[in-house]
Amino acid sequence: MSRGASTDETEPFLPPSSSSESIETPIRASKPVLIRLYISHSLSTWNSRMFEFGAVLFLASIFPGTLLYASIYALVRSLSAVLLSSWLGSVVDRSNRLKAIRQSIIWQRLPVALSCASFVALLTPLGPSYISPLLFAVVTLLACFEKLAYTANTVAVERDWAIVVSDALQIPRQDLNASMRRIDLFCKLLAPVVISLIDSFSTRVAIWTTLGTNASCVLVEYFAIAQVYKSVPELVRNQETDDNQYEGEEATSDSQNSQRSIAHSTVQYARSAVAPWREYVSSPLFLASFALSLLYLTVLSFGTTMVTYLLHTGFNSLQVSGMRIGAVIAELSGTWAAPFIMNKIGPIRSGLWFLNWQFTCLAAAVAAFAFLDNSSQLVAVSLIVGVALSRIGLWGFDLSVQFLVQEGVDEHARARFSSTEMALQNIFELFSFATTIVFPLPEQFKYPVYISYGAIAMAAVCFAAYVRKERGHLLHTSKCFGGDKLRLFGREMPSRDI
């Protein structure tokens, strides 16, 4: 094989050589664009994480002594994403890229502002008794709008803009994906801590802080993403044909709707709602995406459920906080390891390795629950170590699958596919909540652990099936870095790249 042919075949998976003079100038020129992209994504993620966690704290202060309101709030918010994410992805796919992002920013900030006003009103209840339930219903509805807007923003930036920007600026997409994921993890850790500290001082101050942060960031985020759009002409896509076709379909549909029965219209609406799911399931990447989604059915993370269990076994809050910091460090290390390993062995094999790493790290912890006293600190320590190490595999696998989806899904279907994937992730997350509802006692924590580990095992099986389908085998019979060619997404690739 000639050197030129090899370069062409490996281009989608291997970053351009840093020693190439032709690449150095674009990389230097790309820094201002990337900084603006990171600023926009950081502000969107920070504000969403702060509001998401803060809202639960605010409801706990407004309705003390019960978790009912916070539970209903979180459940309805997640259900809205399950039911409407696929439709929202279709809207993003056929929209102007900049317009879609800007609208998502507005629909994130406006519900937060109105929610904060409602929270302040709930803190000082006045008037008839029905005012509080009414305001709670309003807050819950606004949370659905904010969740959907954040979903649209995340899908558009991480699964669409990242592809176009990395290709246009000639930078490794693995590195861009990893940087975006680090932003997510950083905000996921720090934003709840900040709002918790403020809330411990005063809930009212925390509400106003949330409002002020959202209001002060909106213009920065709004114009930063616009500058990215202006700097990367490839982000402009020709929507004229698609829009005209869509408008024509709408006109035809409007003329026919007058003659249709309500029942028939309902059936048509149901079909259009199911269409993204059919497309998702029929995609060659379904098994890989489904494997990633299965990992959201878990209590094996430093979330509320596991923290409650650790406190029950005798650890104090300070110790648990230190454990969470250690887990986040492991997660961040996964975002650095993933691009390096993908560059060496390709995204398919890296995904297989990372997922099996996660499965192996948790084996000892699950075995400890099976054979030892669940309330002992030895079991808890094995769980802590296993979960912390497994986070490297989790986020390495996440980035590997994200790269495969970016590479394998057509441009016109990126947001639709990714938003359907996020809806499925929300479904499995709801199932994880259900496991703790069925087994609520700390002494019963082993059962959610078994279910979570079973989900990881199922994910490993699904991804192994995907690997087998794409590569024709799971393990190389030739040398690890041999030159034999295999097919990926209908193209021949050297075996070392997959």
Image: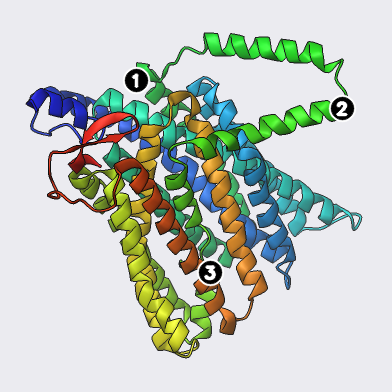
Of marks 3 and 1, the one in the foreground: 3
Residue at figure coordinates x 67%, y 34% from the top left: 273
- Within 10 Å of disc 2 (Cα), the crowding (few <14, some 14-19, many 20+) is few
> Whole-percent x and y of residue 417?
51, 35
Q: Secondary structure at mark 1?
A: helix
Q: Residue 410 has which mark?
A: none
Q: Quadrant of the N terminus?
A: top left
Kindly identify which residue carries mark 2. 262
Kindly identify which residue carries mark 1. 231
Distance between the alpha carbons at the discs numbered 2 and 3? 43 Å
Distance between the alpha carbons at the discs numbered 3 and 1? 48 Å
Residue at figure coordinates x 57%, y 67% from the top left: 200
Q: Say above or below: 391 vs 271.
A: below
Q: Residue furthest right?
A: 128
- Within 10 Å of disc 3 (Cα), the crowding (few <14, some 14-19, many 20+) is some
Q: Earlier in the sequence, mark 2 or mark 3?
A: 2
Residue 61 placement, left or right of 343: right
- Asked if one can make out residue 190 in the rendered structure from this viewpoint, the answer is no
Residue at figure coordinates x 86%, y 53% from the top left: 131
Q: Amino acid at mark 1?
A: Ser
Q: Earlier in the sequence, mark 3 or mark 1?
A: 1
> Whole-percent x and y of residue 320?
44, 75
Q: Residue 451 has which mark?
A: 3
In this view of the protein, which residue sits in the foreground, 427 or 149?
Answer: 427
- Looking at the image, do the residues carrying marks 3 and 1 touch, with CB atoms under 8 Å apart? no
Q: Secondary structure at mark 3?
A: helix
Q: Amino acid at mark 2?
A: Ile
Distance between the alpha carbons at the discs numbered 1 and 2? 48 Å
Q: Say above or below: 411 vs 427.
A: above
